[in-house]
Amino acid sequence: MSVDILMPALSPTMEEGTLAKWLVKEGDDVKAGDVIAEIETDKATMEVEAVDEGKIEALLIPAGSENVKVNTPIARLSGDATGVTPAPAAAPAAETPVVEAKAPAAAATTSAVSSFADPEIPAGTPMKKITVRDALRDAMAEEMRRDDKVFLMGEEVAQYQGAYKVSRDLLQEFGDKRVIDTPITEHGFAGLGVGAAMAGLKPIVEFMTWNFAMQAIDQIINSAAKTLYMSGGQIKSSIVFRGPNGAASRVGAQHSQDYAAWYGNVPGLKVIAPYDAADAKGLMKAAIRDPNPIVFLEHEMMYGVEFDIPDVEDWVVPIGKAKVRRVVAEGHTGPSVTIATYSRMVGFALKAADELAAEGIEAEVVDLRTIRPMDHATILDSVKKTNRLVTVEEGWGPMGVGAEIVARITEFGFDYLDAPPARVHQEDVPLPYAANLEALSLPSVDKIVKAAKAVCYR
Amino acid sequence: MARTRKGEASTGKANDTGVNAFVGKDELLKFYRDMLLIRRFEERAGQLYGMGLIGGFCHLYIGQEAIAVGMQSIKVKGDQIITGYRDHGHMLAAGMDPKEVMAELTGRATGSSHGKGGSMHMFDIETGFYGGHGIVGAQVSLGTGLALNNHYRGNGNVSFAYFGDGAANQGQVYESFNMAQLWKLPVVYVIENNQYAMGTSVERSASETAFHKRGVSFRIPGEQVDGMDVAAVAEAGARAAEHARSGQGPYILEMKTYRYRGHSMSDPAKYRTKEEVDEVKSTRDPIEHLREKLDAAGVTEEQLKVVDADVKRIVAEAAEFARTSPEPDPSELYTDVYLEAAQ
């Protein structure tokens, strides 16, 4: 009886990978624990071990194959193998709810709505495909070339090439003076970064995730955000704090929080949460150049997603401007709704808009891009057309970003609303680990569609 | 009580009689003037607080003057100073205008932070004074960051990060120690051990009360210094600064000192006896101690009186300035929150 060896999931967010190398050949005998292949994930090159004993009957996927989906059979083992072989890690991955955000889906959704002119990108601008990860990397590299006061510090940013590979190759280009591996001491190195910024340098401080930055929040708020004011304008902190924010996949409550509302509450900080590669790059460059402390919220689930990005020399996107990513079609007479959101949830909103369109409801999707300062004018302009508002955020609802949007639109656009606004957000619980509970807790396309219908009284 | 008792790691040459070999008569006289300025300034600040002209928290530096003044004497242009909230003495020692400091205490437009910082939050880049920080221990990481800047630019400057025996128990202090030694950053950590973290004595809060040893597990050298002896402070400071400036990394100085007043103006200091305070005042007072040295060095009472009068005048003028300056214009409410980004 032969069994298939499946492409394993080697990280919480891995959906596909490159089968870099086979370390066995057909006809070889293997036993449990033997390394049989090397697989490159989006983060690292990993070794794959055999789980059962037997003879390699066939190598189904040739070495060097890219984009091999998790759970694809990659080899066949014959012999005495008992039981089934799928790598244990692969099973839950197949059930994760993240399928909604699969790379091709998100990219396809974007190009579908890019049929209307993007005022930021002049017609005829050459475009290229790039992942959000590389867009962030390129932004940092370009700004480090431009200004020798810019440097990167954080855990595993240098020799390891970034825990999520966002700083890949920066050490090689800029050396260890400007790409600094820190000990695991968020509070301490955030303070060092702010101190260096007070003395005029321009640090980029990477948190491996924003969850760990709670250790450092005192330095971000009390030192970086407040000192300009407390010093009567004398001491500035031109510093970027960045890293992945929000829920990845199945990493549990302590690694899955959205901090947009937390930092958005603080005067003195600017808070940025981009969705696609063009904004990730353009806003990162603007953030590094900005003389104020910046909280830059990335999303792990978006790192590997490819988007079109303008292939121009110096792509900078202004901080504080929302972007309308989908407009209500001309001549639409049925109900319409504004969906205001940010970061990964923009992709969910665009997908929801497609589903709503099929049911005769047109949605205008406003991507905040910057949480603070919040461009509520752009949301209000949209609400003036649609008269209905749904907000979507990955974080909790109470005192959240959606609460702030709703307050402002109620305050400044009360007469334009035909229905009470609705908020879609994470359920009011710590994010659960179990795949089904996690899916129930997080916002989904379905929840957005339901909320949009509700404000349209459908 | 031995005034110049040195710590076990010290190799200093300070002695207990007459002028220290390290500093001359003129410098001692300047020390006297600067220390007296701090004491009279703080006494006046306490008075203005009592009159309701100064609000909020106000932490006086009386008793600890020798540290700020002695350390200032070995600082060179471009070096930075950063401290916690007991900061008035450091600002005056650094050379900030007493008028601007006092006006900040009274929350006036002419204050060094335009009235928006207050007692705990003052800054002056010109003199290298980077605050004035209200969160216990935060200045240690920030000061290490100032040193990271010096290291990055190779400017030869040293950062002096001051903190108390209370802050010495904060976690980020040790995170900073580790990185400073790992990267050989030019920083001198000055622990002002005044025996009490607010109302908790070091014996009740510290498992190791010899704070100069707190760097041992990071291989950071440290020494204990009589923080009531300005010459001993200056001498140890010079040694520490040279260590940092020459690329050997951080250095810890534990200054044994004492604060005469409560933790802040609202602290009745019931956690220690009056006898304990009086004992220090009568036997270890840094200014009285220095007067004896000046006397031994041949400085006359008349010369000291001239200094006393000058200091008295400066403080009176500062108080008057702080009392009569206008409050900040309401339009200042929304300034200095953000800087304009260059286009």
Image (spheres, coloured by chain):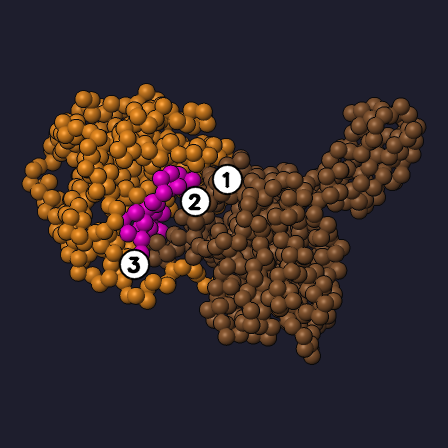
Chain colours: A brown, B orange
- Whether discs 1 and 2 lie on one chain: the answer is yes
Instruction: Look at mark 3 in the image and give the residue it sits on.
Output: B114
Residue bounds of the magenta highlight: B116-143
Give x and y (percent) for residue A348: 67, 57
Dot placed on the residue nearer the N-terminal end, 1 or 2: 1
B194 to the left or right of A199: left
Instruction: Name the residue carrying label 1.
Output: A186
Q: CA distance from mark 1 to mark 3?
A: 32 Å
Q: Is residue B245 visible?
A: no
Q: Is residue B126 left or right of residue A257?
A: left
Do callouts 3 and 2 point to residues on the same chain?
Answer: no
Q: In front: B340, or B263?
A: B263
Residue B214 painted magenta? no
Percent coordinates x, y for residue A207 in the rendering? 55, 44
Residue bearing mark 2:
A218
Q: Nearer the viewer, mark 1 or mark 3?
A: 1
* Amino acid tagged 3: His
